[in-house]
Every structure is written in C-alpha cells, then in structure tokens.
C-alpha cells in the first residue's frame, strides 16, 4: 500500500430533511458507494473517508471542527447529493483550515427515461452544488472545483492530483529545514523572510553548526561505511580509483542522515563557503539523501530546499523524478535553443536516464579535497521548473513548463550530472518571462508534478502563483505581474 494512503480526505455529503427519511437513506447509500469506489481507484493515491451525511448547521460545523484537528485528515471533499441550503454551511466553512475540494458530480451517469419527481428530489446535484458553490465564493474560500462523473478516469485523475497538492500542504506545515552555514555571500535571491515563511507555509528554518556535523562525521565507523559502500557498488557504477574520497562521502551521508532524522528535518542546506573541518563539499552524500526524499538547496538556499522536499512528497509513487536544479548555460542554435541545467555536484539521481557513475574530480571552489559525485544524464520528457521567491511582503511561486531532451553533446569533460531542456514557449521568450517574474537560478525540476498541482498548492497556501506556458507572451506576463502586484498590495 502506498504510504500516501495514510493521508485521509473526508467525504462530506450535504442534504437536508425536506425530502424525508427514504431519500436520506438513498443519499447515504450512494455516498458510501462513491467513497468505496474512489478508494479502489488506481488514480486516487490517498484514503477517501466517508463521513455520515450532514443535514443541519450543527452537524456541518461539528464535522469540520473534527477535520481541522484530526492529524490524519489532509483535506475535505464536499458533494451535495440533494439541495443543501448553503447558509447551513457558513459557520463550518468559516473555520475550515484544511484544503477543500468541491466535487460536482451525481450518482447516476444518465437521466433515465422513467424519470419522475422522486428521482428528481433525490438526484439534484446540478441544483444543490450550485447553491453550495455560491457560499464558497461568497466566503471567498480557496477551493478546487472538479466537475464530471465520479467514475470517469479524468475526474479521478484530477481529484488524485489535487490530493497530492493537499499532501504538499500538510507536509509544508510540518516541515523543518536544517541549515549548515549561511547563504552564499552577496547573493540576493536565496535570501528571504524566514518568519514570514513559517507564518505562511509552516516551515521551521534553523541553523546547526558545521562543527556539529564534523563531529558526527568523525564518529562514523568503518563498518558503517563498508555497509554503505556495498550499496553504492550495487546501485551505481564505481568509476574511480579514489576510493577514499567515496568513503568520505559515505561518512557524510551517514552523519547528515542521523542529524536530520534526530531533528525531524525533511530538508537542509549547505554552502561551499562554510566547510570548516570538512574534507569535501557534500556531493554524492547530498545526491543520495535527495534520492531518499530529503530536500536540498545549495549555497544556503532554504526555499528551494523546502520546495524540493515538498514536491518529492507530493509525487511519491509516481514515475519521473524530482531534483534540485540550476540553469547553467544556453545553446542558441537557431531553431533548437536549449538550456543546460546542472550543478557543481548536487543533482538527484531520481531523474537519471541510465545507471549513474560514481566519479571523483576537482571542484575548483571551496578549497577542499576532490569530492565524489554521481555523474549521469537526465531523461527526456515533459517537466516543470519551480521557483519560490520572496517579493518583500509576499511569496511568489513561479512555474515554467519545459520539455527535457536528450543532451545534444556528449560533454566528456563536464563531470557533473546534467540535463537539457527547451523552456516554453521558447528559450528567448521563456527566459525573458522568467527574469521579469523574478525567478531564481535555483529551481526544483520535476517530471512528476504538474503546473496545475503547483497552482492548487499556491492557492491552498495563499501565495502568489505565476505560470509560464506555451501560450505566455512577454506582454501578457507583464500585465499579469502588474495586476498581481496591485491585487496583493490591496490584500
């Protein structure tokens, strides 16, 4: 069973007593069937929990209070089988603090030829969901509306995708980020208001001394390293004679993992400018921890570190992979303009096309020994690049659609993991739009999560969202950014 099944989404169905006990009995039966069928769907990653139908303001408020304080509840799904007067929902929805999806469906797919008033009184979602929709809009509650027949694949996929975004919210609200060292000196975009991030997103971002990490590294035993080296040999191609450099990365991995788990942290940062007492900058160690699900940000970039962890949790069980990434250089070949993405060392092997190689090469910065790292090429396919930036007074989540491609060069002298992609709508327009939006050079690159899911996440967290797609132009993006600026200042 997927670990995401531990997250519950409460299926809350509204009705009223106007239609009599027989109708309510059918409402209950139908609601249980839908919940059970959704739980059996391959497209629904989390648990759908049926809750007894609600028919009064007190019942509605009670179940929403329970949802708010249930640690397993990651959100609610509402559906009005009949007409449920929406004033009954005001007190409950006004205090809701969990993600909220309004499923606009009905139990029957088709209208039967023998339709009568009893059928009409029972199956009136087209009526009841509009009343319910009004109160959500009137209360200005962020919510997802999914319309369609509940048994259809497209509806279940959209519902499952929304659930993953909601899982991102619950992960975010419980996330701790460990920082070793500060941000890279004089860099602006990796800075940000950690207090505001905790208020808006729940992140607890705190610093640990590099000396504490060094102490943990020095306490790692040869037996622990030997065991991890066997795992390396099994999973990767060992393409170096400098075994001691690889063994030192194993010590870093063991020490880092211990510290992160003891502190309950899901993400961390470091910087090549603060490695006092360490022999190497973490390379292979960081790649391995990212592969396991920990978020990472280089040069102290705690925002991208946290987002990497969140997106990895959102995409759990999906193919594709997610990694910390950085735009490095361009190929301006006319008609085939591409971006080369990489980093000094730290790209997650979850995005690798083939079996990664462990190599040891000089780094050139940091003043430490040559670090071991995994070298590979990323896979081709549709993906997104995600950047969270602090705009001063608000957070902006920028997402760009991209098409990853097989690298057009072998690049035998570039000993790092790398990836090439075509930004939407094209490199020139895409780069101009990214820069105008204030997107960082560090991103989360993911094949597994969509722009729509990131928009859902942003709406749930009440942060600004900017999407650069195949339809984006510089002119319309400027207008969007201008209007967003006004709207958020008024907010």
Image (spheres, rainbow, N blue to C red):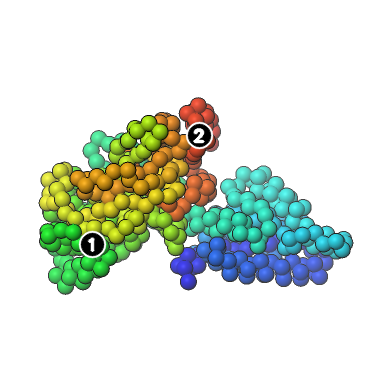
For this rendering, which residue is in front, 146 or 321?
A: 321
Residue in view at x 23 percent, y 65 percent: 232
| Disc marking residue 135 | none
State the residue position of label 2.
Answer: 472
- Residue 238: percent from left, percent from top: 20, 62
Residue 385 seen in this snapshot: yes
User: 166 left or right of 411?
Assistant: right
User: 485 left or right of 185?
Assistant: right
Residue 177 seen in this snapshot: no
Residue in view at x 59 percent, y 50 percent: 143
- Residue 170: percent from left, percent from top: 47, 57
Q: Mark 2 touching mark 1, by CB under 8 A?
A: no
Image quarter for residue 194? top left
Q: Residues within 10 Å of mark 2 (few under 14, many from 20)?
A: some
Q: Residues within 10 Å of mark 1 (few under 14, many from 20)?
A: some
Q: Earlier in the sequence, mark 2 or mark 1?
A: 1
For this rendering, which residue is in front, 3 or 476?
A: 476
- Residue 290: percent from left, percent from top: 32, 57
- Residue 169: percent from left, percent from top: 48, 54
| Disc marking residue 237 | 1
Residue in view at x 55 percent, y 65 percent: 42
Under circle 1, the secondary element is strand
């Amino acid at each position: 069973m997927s670990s995401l099944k531990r997250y519950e989404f409460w299926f809350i169905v509204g009705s009223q007593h106007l239609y009599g006990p027989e109708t309510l009995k059918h409402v209950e039966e139908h609601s249980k069937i839908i919940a059970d069928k959704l739980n059996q769907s391959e497209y629904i990653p989390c648990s759908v929990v049926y809750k007894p139908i609600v028919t009064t303001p007190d019942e509605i408020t009670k179940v929403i209070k329970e949802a708010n304080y249930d640690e397993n509840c990651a959100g609610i799904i509402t559906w009005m089988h009949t007409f449920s007067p929406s004033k009954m929902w005001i007190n409950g929805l006004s205090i809701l603090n969990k993600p909220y999806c309004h499923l606009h469906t009905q139990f029957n797919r088709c209208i039967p030829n023998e339709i009568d008033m009893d059928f009409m009184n029972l199956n009136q979602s087209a009526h009841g969901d509009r009343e319910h929709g009004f109160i959500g809009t009137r209360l200005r509650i962020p919510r997802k509306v999914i319309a369609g027949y509940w048994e259809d694949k497209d509806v279940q996929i959209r519902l499952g995708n929304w659930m993953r975004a909601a899982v991102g919210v619950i992960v975010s609200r419980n996330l701790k980020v460990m920082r070793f060292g500060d941000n890279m000196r004089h860099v602006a975009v990796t800075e940000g208001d950690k207090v505001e991030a905790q208020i808006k997103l729940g992140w607890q971002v705190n610093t640990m001394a590099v000396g504490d990490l060094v102490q943990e590294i020095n306490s790692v035993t040869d037996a622990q390293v030997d065991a991890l080296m066997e795992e390396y040999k099994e999973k990767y191609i060992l393409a170096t004679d400098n075994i001691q450099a690889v063994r030192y990365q194993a010590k870093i991995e063991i020490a880092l993992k211990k510290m992160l788990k003891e502190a309950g942290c899901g993400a961390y940062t470091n910087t090549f400018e603060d490695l006092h007492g360490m022999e190497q900058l973490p390379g292979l160690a960081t790649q391995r921890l990212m592969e396991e699900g920990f978020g990472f940000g280089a040069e102290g970039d705690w925002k991208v570190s946290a987002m990497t962890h969140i997106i990895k949790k959102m995409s759990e069980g999906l193919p594709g992979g997610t990694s910390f990434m950085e735009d490095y250089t361009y190929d301006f070949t006319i008609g085939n303009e591409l971006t080369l993405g990489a980093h000094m060392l730290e790209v997650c092997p979850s995005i690798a096309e083939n079996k990664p190689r462990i190599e040891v090469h000089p780094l050139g910065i940091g003043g430490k020994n040559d670090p071991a790292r995994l070298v590979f090429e990323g896979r081709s396919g549709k993906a997104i690049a995600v950047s969270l930036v602090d705009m001063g007074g608000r957070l902006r989540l920028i997402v760009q659609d991209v098409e990853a491609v097989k690298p057009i060069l072998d690049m035998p002298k570039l000993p790092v993991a790398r990836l090439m992609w075509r930004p939407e709508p094209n490199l020139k327009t895409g780069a101009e739009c990214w820069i105008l939006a204030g997107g960082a050079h560090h991103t989360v690159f993911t094949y597994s999560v969509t722009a729509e899911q990131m928009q859902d996440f942003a709406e749930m967290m009440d942060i600004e969202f900017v999407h650069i797609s195949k339809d984006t132009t510089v002119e319309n993006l400027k207008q969007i950014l201008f209007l967003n600026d006004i709207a958020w200042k008024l907010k």
